[in-house]
Each structure stands twice: as structure tokens, then as C-alpha cells.
Amino acid sequence: MKETRYAVFLDIDNTLLADGKIPPVNIETIRQVREQGSFVFLNTARSHACIPDSLLRDVPLDGVVAGIGTDLRFGEKRLMSEIISRDELKQIAAHFMGDPREVGFEGEDVMLWINPDKSRHAEHLVHSPKDFDTVYRDVRISKMYVRGQLTPEEFEEFGKTNIMYQHESYAEFVQKGFGKAEGMRTMIRYLGIPLSRCIAMGDSSNDEDMLRAAGVSVAMGNAIPEIKAICTYISCDAKDGGVAQALRELILERPEQS
């Protein structure tokens, strides 16, 4: 029998979500795709603690690749859980102590902060690098982000052990050896699905490795030009249900599905 199952990997912000909301058509179309036998996963830069409970509750998913490929979950089963060492966390915290920029330590269960924006009502603050040996000793941090721009010196220093992404308003980094693409590959190896039947959707620079690796790559209509240039399919804007449009045309309306 011809294989008709796909594995779909969705970025969250400005892909599945638009202005913090999920277009209802995305939810219904994802449900239809799963009902016909395909798998749908989030593949996000956010750590698991930073994914809204409402998203996990409202969107029918098979699992999550979180923290730029460091935290993989298939249903209730955890396939991978990699974290930043306490020594490195202490070094990063020491660097940013006294710096006005907001710093987020994104964990599997909680988020820690240095200088959080007042609108966040952050509960877990890092007051000293020593906090990672005491009050936060058991907190598992999978990735980092810094609000604003890193200096060239910071980019070089942190880049010795991390993969760096500098966006317009923030920077994020994760340990070398991990990424959205590698997380996606690990998940499909577990499922026994080839890359040729892997569909990835995104909009920004931290999606690039995932999109280049997938058999079919989809850029939202609102994606940055560099992402559109490498994708095999360009959908409509996220706010107009770009995920749903791509799923309909690439899976639900394909002749092999009828």
C-alpha cells in the first residue's frame, strides 16, 4: 500500500498563531489531517514552559519539539530532554547582572528572569549567579533569550558553545548540536517516516534549518524574504490561516488522499 502519512512540523509565532491567536480554520484543518493518518507537531523555539496551556489544549497535536530541538515529546512520552549546564547558566547570569536588558532563562517547567519587563509579572527572578546552585538548582533550562541586540563581542563569546539567532528585537541561543531540524529528524526517525514526507512551516530565521531539511517547506505569506526564498511553497499570511491553506493543498486535496 502506498504511504500516505505525513509528519507536519509547525512553528508557533506568526505561523500557527497570528497576533497571539489561532485562526479557527487552522485547528479544524489540523484535526482533519490527523484523522486521515498524518502526524502534526509543534516545532518551536519556545521552551516547553513558554508554550501556552491553551494552545496545547485547543490544538489537536501528536507532540512537541520545543526549545529549538532540545525537548521532544510524543504524546506523553519524552524522547529528548537536553539542558544548559549550571556552570554555563552562572556565567551567563554573571555577564548580564547589572545590564538593563531583559534576559529569559527558558525552562521545561518554569521561566527565570533577569530584569523582566514590568508587564510580565514575573515570579522567578535570578538575583545572583549563585541562585543556580541554591533556589534554582533543580530547574532545567533548555534555551536563553536576551531582549534587544547582542554586541559583536557577546555574539562571539556566547557563540563558542551555542547556536545564535539575532532577531530584530531579541536574540536567542541554544547549545550547539541542537536545532529545529535535528529535533524534527529525531521525531520522524522515531515514527519511521522519511524526510520526503515531512512538511515544515515557518516564517523567521530560526526556522531555516528545519525548512531546508524538510521534504516540503512552507513559508507563511508574512515570512521574511530570506525564508520565502528557500521554501517550496508559499502560503497566505498566518492571520488568514496560512497553515490551513497549506495543509489543504499539500495533504487533504492531493489525489492520493481521495
Image (spheres, grey):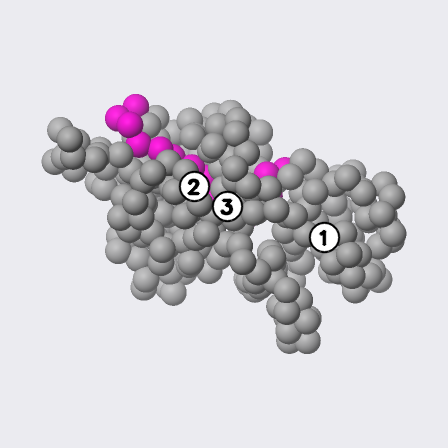
Relative to residue 159, is residue 221 depicted above or below?
Answer: above
Residue at 87%, 52% (x, y): give it.
130
Residue 187 bears which disc, if any?
Answer: 2
Residue that carries the numbered disc 3 in the rendered image: 44
On screen, residue 77 above or below 184:
above
**Residues at circles 1 and 2 in contact by the CB criterion of under 8 Å:** no
Q: Is residue 76 above or below residue 6?
A: above
Residue 193 in the figure: left or right of residue 116: left
Q: CA distance from mark 1 to mark 2?
A: 24 Å
Kindly state the secondary structure of the residue where label 2 is placed.
Answer: helix
Horizontal side, residue 42 vs residue 249: left or right: right
Residue at left 50%, top 45%? 44
Residue 40 highlighted magenta (yes or no): yes
**Which residue appears farthest toward the bottom when viewing the image?**
153
Are the two marked residues, 1 and 3, in contact with CB atoms closer than 8 angstroms?
no
Q: Nearer the viewer, residue 193 or 61?
A: 193
The magenta-colored residue range is 35-49
